[in-house]
Amino acid sequence: MSSSLEGKVALVTGASSGIGRATAHALAAAGASVALAARRADRLEELRVELESKGATVQVIGLDVTDEQAVAAAVRSALDTLGRLDILVNNAGLMLLGPVEDADTTDWTRMMDTNVMGLMYMTHAALPELIRNQGTIVQISSIAARVVGRGSAVYNASKFAVNGFSEGLRQEVTERGVRVVVIEPGTVETELRDHITHAPSKAAITERVARIRQLQSEDIADAVLYAVTAPPHATVNEIFIRPTDQA
Ligand SMILES: NC(=O)c1ccc[n+]([C@@H]2O[C@H](COP(=O)([O-])OP(=O)(O)OC[C@H]3O[C@@H](n4cnc5c(N)ncnc54)[C@H](OP(=O)(O)O)[C@@H]3O)[C@@H](O)[C@H]2O)c1
């Protein structure tokens, strides 16, 4: 096991699948202790067993990031159990595509609450400890913060919000040694699309991605690892990573 993150503690939201799961693997393999947060605690338990079998120190935290009090309790619990916090990966997210006209606005609420409010609550709760440790915050944003498309307006809005929030945060904390990293993946093969409730949008994106070689979660985990293992004086502010086949 490499030791570049030996002695560091990371908290990864949305660690129960996809990019979050792969990121937890990568951080643990680099020597970090990892707190795994998501709603599906059974999935997190499976991951804990896997990571512990490779020698990692792991904590499972059942968490809905839209619940601000639960977020604060999760950060306290990670500090109590793992002793400190150096890296926060705000990865939990939803992509509920569909046109604005006739939208089921509960999709909007779920998406904004998770992608935006959840990420901001997590950041707020962890920030004092991250300032203390000159830590790193990694925001899993999206190509949707850069490229706008029909049927994606609210997902776009949520990821534009992530980027705006993160740049403002960066300016507030960078001179105190806290690094804010924004990662913007294009299409990654995960469960993200499974949750789309608007059937025509789901069918269209399923058809579109079938024609390309999608990114894998491990590609994004590699990008996270690159950013968090950069020397402390260097901040990788932004990584935009797309499938080669995605024009
Ligand atoms: N896949 C892509 O093409 C792509 C591209 C660009 C950006 N992204 C971003 O990457 C991030 C991860 O997505 P993914 O592609 O890995 O999809 P995924 O496999 O569906 O993972 C999403 C994760 O978010 C968690 N989550 C959702 N709502 C939550 C909540 N309220 N509280 C806590 N955790 C919650 C889920 O866990 P539970 O259901 O167990 O809570 C799950 O672990 C998202 O922010 C997404 O926007 C993905």
Image (cartoon, rainbow, N blue to C red):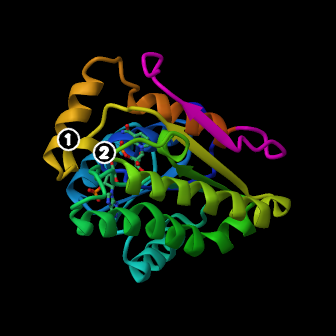
Instruction: Residue 205: give x, y in percent of width and height.
Output: 26, 34
Q: Residue furthest bottom?
A: 69
Q: CA distance from mark 2 to mark 1?
A: 19 Å
Q: Is the residue indicated by label 2 positioned so its CB lies within 8 Å of ligand 1?
A: yes
Instruction: Residue 26: give x, y in percent of width and height.
Output: 49, 36
Say above or below: 146 vs 204.
below
Q: Residue at x 73, y 38 (%)?
A: 230
Q: Which residue is mark 1?
A: 202
Read off the magenta span: 230-247
Which residue type carries mark 1? Lys
Q: Residue at x 28, y 52 (%)?
A: 99
Element under label 1?
A: helix
Horizontally, residue 226 falls left or right of residue 72, namely right
Which residue type carries mark 2? Ser
Horizontally, residue 184 falls left or right of residue 192, namely right
Q: Residue at x 31, y 41 (%)?
A: 50
Residue 25 versus residue 242: which sits nearer the camera? Answer: 242
- Say whether residue 237 is magenta: yes
Snapshot quadrant of residue 178: bottom right
Say above or below: 157 vs 132.
above
Q: Residues within 10 Å of mark 1 (few under 14, many from 20)?
A: some
Residue 8 versus residue 213: which sits nearer the camera? Answer: 213
